[in-house]
């Protein structure tokens, strides 16, 4: 599946701007990690873009429904397996570097976005590793974001947590305007 095909699929199934922005954030982080690990950037971007594409229409069967659809479209099994593995409750093991990266960036992208939106200027440029970690301690802040999974993701990816947070913040900065997170 090409990036343009993935983008069309995302926009066909996801109307909520917040969910679209989340997909774009995960895409940006996946692209950055693909470059770091010298992997196929387009494949990793497509994976990030599509990881939640079915969530809005099929929340009770996500990601099963979306992955069934992707299989029917002939999408590379590595993408499908990574998407299945990003949801812990599926029980699908994250056996590839791409799958581990998707799991590692998904919750963290959402959390960094939430941290950004409570900053005075709502700008990603104001967010630091320290500010993210401080907000992680407040269990009422972005309460639905699983802090243990954020830490587990970095561990599975084989990167130190602070380094991972810094890397993802930096990966999102070029996309800040698209994400509604300042410039």
Image (cartoon, grey):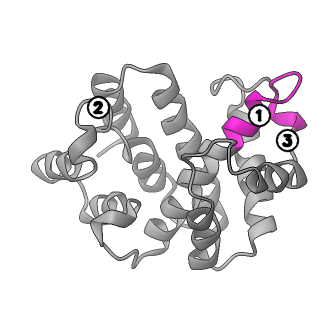
**136 lies above or below 93:** above
* Label 2 CA crowd tier, 10 Å (few <14, some 14–19, many 20+): some
Foreground tag (2 vs 3): 3
- Of mark 2 and mark 1, the one earlier in the sequence is 2
Residue 137: give its label: none
The residue that mark 1 highlights is: 116
Describe the element under mark 1 as helix, strand or loop. Answer: helix
Tag 3 or tag 1, which sits nearer the N-term?
A: 1
Determine if the magenta segment contains residue 58: no
Residue at the spot of label 2: 9
Q: Main secondary structure of the magenta part?
A: helix
Mark 2 secondary-structure assignment: helix
Q: Position of residue 152 (x, y in %)?
A: 59, 72
Q: Which residues are magenta?
A: 112-126
Decide: few, some or many residues near mark 1? Use Cα within 10 Å; few <14, some 14-19, many ≥20: many
On screen, residue 65 versus residue 11, left or right, reads left
Q: Which residue is farthest left?
A: 72
What's the CA distance linking mark 2 and mark 1? 28 Å
Which image quadrant is residue 110 in? top right
Q: CA distance from mark 2 to mark 3?
A: 31 Å
- Residue 90: percent from the left, percent from the top? 28, 65
From the viewer's perspective, is 49 left or right of 36? left
Q: How many marks?
A: 3
> Disc 3 designates what residue?
127
Q: Residue at x 64, y 42 (%)?
A: 142
Spot occupied by residue 55 in the image (x, y as percentages of width and height): 32, 38
Q: In this orientation, does residue 180 appear?
A: yes
Q: CA distance from mark 1 to mark 3?
A: 6 Å
* Residue neighbourhood size for the residue with mark 3, other residues' Cα within 10 Å, grouped as few (<14), some (14–19), many (≥20): many
Q: Earlier in the sequence, mark 2 or mark 3?
A: 2
Residue visible at 39% across and 65% down in the picture: 88
């Amino acid at each position: 599946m090409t990036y343009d095909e993935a983008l069309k699929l995302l926009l066909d199934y996801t109307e909520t701007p917040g969910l679209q922005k989340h997909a774009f954030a995960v895409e940006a982080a996946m692209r950055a990690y693909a470059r770091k690990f010298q992997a196929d950037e387009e494949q990793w971007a497509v994976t990030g873009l599509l990881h939640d594409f079915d969530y809005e229409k099929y929340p009770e069967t996500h990601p099963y429904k979306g992955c069934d659809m992707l299989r029917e479209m002939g999408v590379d099994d590595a993408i499908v397996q990574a998407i299945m593995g990003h949801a812990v409750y599926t029980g699908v093991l994250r056996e590839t570097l791409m799958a581990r990266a998707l799991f590692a960036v998904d919750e963290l992208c959402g959390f960094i976005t939430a941290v950004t939106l409570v900053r005075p200027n709502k700008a990603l440029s104001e967010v630091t590793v320290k500010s993210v970690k401080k907000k992680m301690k407040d269990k009422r802040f972005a309460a639905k974001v699983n802090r243990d999974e954020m830490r587990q993701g970095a561990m599975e990816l084989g990167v130190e947590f602070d380094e991972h947070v810094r890397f993802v913040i930096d990966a999102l900065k070029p996309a800040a305007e698209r994400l509604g997170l300042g410039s």
